[in-house]
Amino acid sequence: MTMPDYEVEAARYDESRGGQPRARAAATAIETLLPAGPVLDVAVGTGIVAAAMARPVIGVDLSSAMLGHASRRLPGRVARADARSLPVASDSVSAVTAIWLLHLMPDSEAVVREVARVLRRGGVFVCTVDKRAAHRLAEGNPALPGARDERSRVEALGARYGLAVSGEGSFVGYGQDYEPVFPLLALTKKQ
């Protein structure tokens, strides 16, 4: 799978992926899995989900075009950064999200390892898992094994870096074909 060119996609990203209804559904589901306080959103994209959350969110992304949209939604709270090398001190963050990221990464392990590094003990990482499987199931097709964001893989990677499953949830991809149900996984850094 090739990664979309988000410098090009940014202009139509929100409207082509469910817009505000999908963002609100995602934000509501994510919030139920997080502790109180601010969040570091890795791959914040256009900031549409982060802006729908009822807490302060600091977002990072590699795409300058996506960050252009995010900076309007989250003024002063976005930065350009790679999810595999976050400009954040070790053991300093209590909540990290990565929504619709791991399925794109050629090395999702690098992201999980980096999130584990920046989380403080008891901190929570919430991410989407099984994204392509959600689309396939919504279309009436069987899920294919071996995805980079397959739940069992993300759980195993989390365990490797001291993160244990602490919750799960889901939300509907409103406004998309077949309206897939996207699974969320919460992993907590062991005390």
Image (cartoon, rainbow, N blue to C red):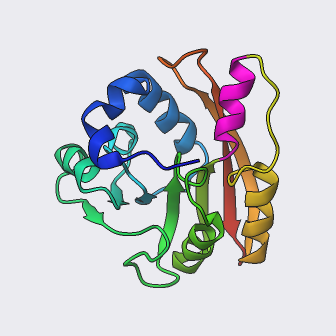
- Looking at this view, name the residue that lies furthest to the bottom: 90
- State whether residue 90 is above or below residue 147: below
Which residue is pictured at 28% across the width and 48% down the height?
7
Residue 81 picture location, percent across and down: 35, 69
Residue 76 lies left or right of residue 106; in this view the side is left
Instruction: Between residue 61 and residue 73, name the one nearer to us.
Output: 61
Magenta residues span 129-139
Residue 149 picture location, percent across and down: 68, 52
Most common secondary structure along the magenta stretch:
helix
Q: Report the number of discs.
A: 0
Which residue is pictured at 68% across the width and 49% down the height?
185
Q: Is there any visible trace of residue 120 in the rendered image?
A: no
Which residue is pictured at 17% across the width and 52% down the height?
75
Which residue is pictured at 65% across the width and 69% down the height?
109
- State whether residue 149 is above or below residue 13: below
Instruction: Between residue 108 and residue 92, name the one nearer to us.
Output: 108
